[in-house]
Every structure is written in structure tokens, then in C-alpha cells.
């Protein structure tokens, strides 16, 4: 996230409080729309004036939902957890990816929703899901991450190896297969 977005989110938190900003981000994940000032805060220049009518088009609503998830990298309240976990099933890959990243960052236990994302068509989603499962999953959840050690995308293979190492350390036990370095 750019420094400009980080600054806008910090300004919104200063004006409205962390809980309200996090709740608005969660609403944005669920609905794809929010008040104009908030759309501008999370979307910057891409949000234009933040006119909610613009976000009625599916492509813009998906973009706005991804901004909501991205904002939760910088502001958090537990009340946003359910929206993040629901966002793992979003049809837009950017939303799934950002929600998986939030699961990793906030250590949200959502293996039931994350494990299927390890087979996502988009490599960025697989990458984020591997990180999240590595940080929060149980040993049985890691079997699918082990499968990503042979993924077609180099970054996914590297992330899978990192996730397995982290999981082995966190669970204090080896998994069935050692990660590749």
C-alpha cells in the first residue's frame, strides 16, 4: 500500500476512530459501497469523487471491496473478522487475495475458507492463502500447502516453503514433507 493511502487511512482514524474506520472497511468488503469520504480515503485518486453511483457497476464494486480489505492492513477491530472471512469467498480475486492477507496478518483462524483458496486459479490468491494457512492452520490444513511446493508459479512455491517452515516452528513439529529452500 502506498504511503499516500496509509496517510489517508491514518487521517480517517484520527477523525473517526479506529473502530469506525475498521467497521466501514468491513462494510465495504460486504457491500462494495460506503460514504464518499471513505471511498476516497481507501481508494485515493481511483475513487474519483467517491460518488456511490459509480460503484454500482460490478467492476467498481469489486475494486471497492478490495480497498476495504486492503484498509484493514492498517486499521483493525475484531468486528471486521466476519467480513474478512466472508470475503475469502468473493468472486473478485483481489478481494480474496486481500482478505487472505488480512487473515495472515491478523492471524484469523479461517482454515475452512482458506484451504480451498490454495487451489485458486489466480497465483496471487494461492500465495496469500499459503501464508495465512501457514500462520494459522493446523497440521492437517498444511497438506494442501505442501502441494504448492510444486506450483507452477515461482513465488507461490517460495511462499509455500515459507509457510511450511513457519507452521513447523509454530506447531513445534515436522510436517510430512520438508519445505524446499
Image (cartoon, rainbow, N blue to C red):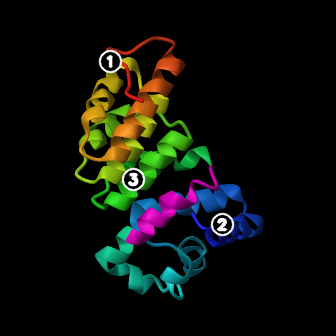
Specify the segment rendered in magenta. Answer: 63-76
Residue extending farthest to the front is 181
Q: Is residue 70 magenta?
A: yes
Kindly indicate the quadrant of the structure image that contains residue 11: bottom right
Residue designated by label 1: 177
Q: How many other residues sit within 10 Å of disc 1, few (<14), some (14-19) or many (≥20)?
A: few
Please report whichever mark, 3 or 1, sits nearer to the chain's N-terminal start: 3
- Given residues 98 and 158, the one toward you in this image is 158
Q: Which mark is residue 115?
A: none
- Given residues 51 and 1, the one toward you in this image is 1
Distance between the alpha carbons at the discs numbered 2 and 1: 42 Å
Please report whichever mark, 3 or 2, sits nearer to the chain's N-terminal start: 2
Residue designated by label 3: 97
Q: Which callout, 3 or 2, points to the residue nearer the camera?
A: 3
Q: Is residue 142 magenta?
A: no
Q: Which callout, 2 or 1, points to the residue nearer the camera?
A: 1
- Given residues 129 and 92, the one toward you in this image is 129
Which quadrant is home to the C terminus?
top left
Which quadrant is home to the N terminus?
bottom right
Residue designated by label 2: 9
State whether the magenta stretch is mostly helix, strand or loop. Answer: helix
Q: Position of residue 91 (x, y in %)?
A: 27, 59
Q: In this view, does 149 lie above or below 7?
A: above
Q: Where is residue 58 in the image (x, y as percent from the top left)?
A: 30, 75
Amino acid at each position: 500500500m502506498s504511503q499516500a493511502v496509509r496517510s489517508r487511512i491514518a487521517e480517517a482514524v484520527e477523525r473517526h476512530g479506529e473502530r469506525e474506520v475498521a467497521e466501514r472497511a468491513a462494510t465495504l468488503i460486504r457491500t462494495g459501497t460506503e460514504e464518499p469520504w471513505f471511498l476516497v480515503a481507501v481508494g485515493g485518486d481511483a475513487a474519483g469523487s467517491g460518488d456511490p453511483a459509480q460503484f454500482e457497476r460490478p467492476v467498481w464494486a469489486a475494486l471497492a471491496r478490495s480497498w476495504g480489505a486492503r484498509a484493514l492492513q492498517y486499521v483493525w477491530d475484531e468486528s471486521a473478522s466476519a467480513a474478512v472471512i466472508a470475503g475469502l469467498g468473493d468472486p473478485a480475486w483481489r478481494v480474496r487475495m486481500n482478505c487472505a492477507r488480512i487473515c495472515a496478518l491478523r492471524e484469523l483462524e479461517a482454515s475452512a475458507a482458506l484451504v480451498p483458496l490454495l487451489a485458486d486459479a489466480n497465483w496471487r490468491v494461492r500465495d496469500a492463502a499459503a501464508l495465512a494457512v501457514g500462520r494459522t492452520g493446523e497440521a492437517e490444513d498444511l497438506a494442501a500447502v505442501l502441494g504448492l511446493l510444486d506450483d507452477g508459479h515461482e513465488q507461490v512455491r517460495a511462499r509455500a516453503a515459507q509457510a511450511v517452515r513457519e507452521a513447523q516452528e509454530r506447531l513445534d513439529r515436522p510436517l510430512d514433507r520438508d519445505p524446499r529452500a
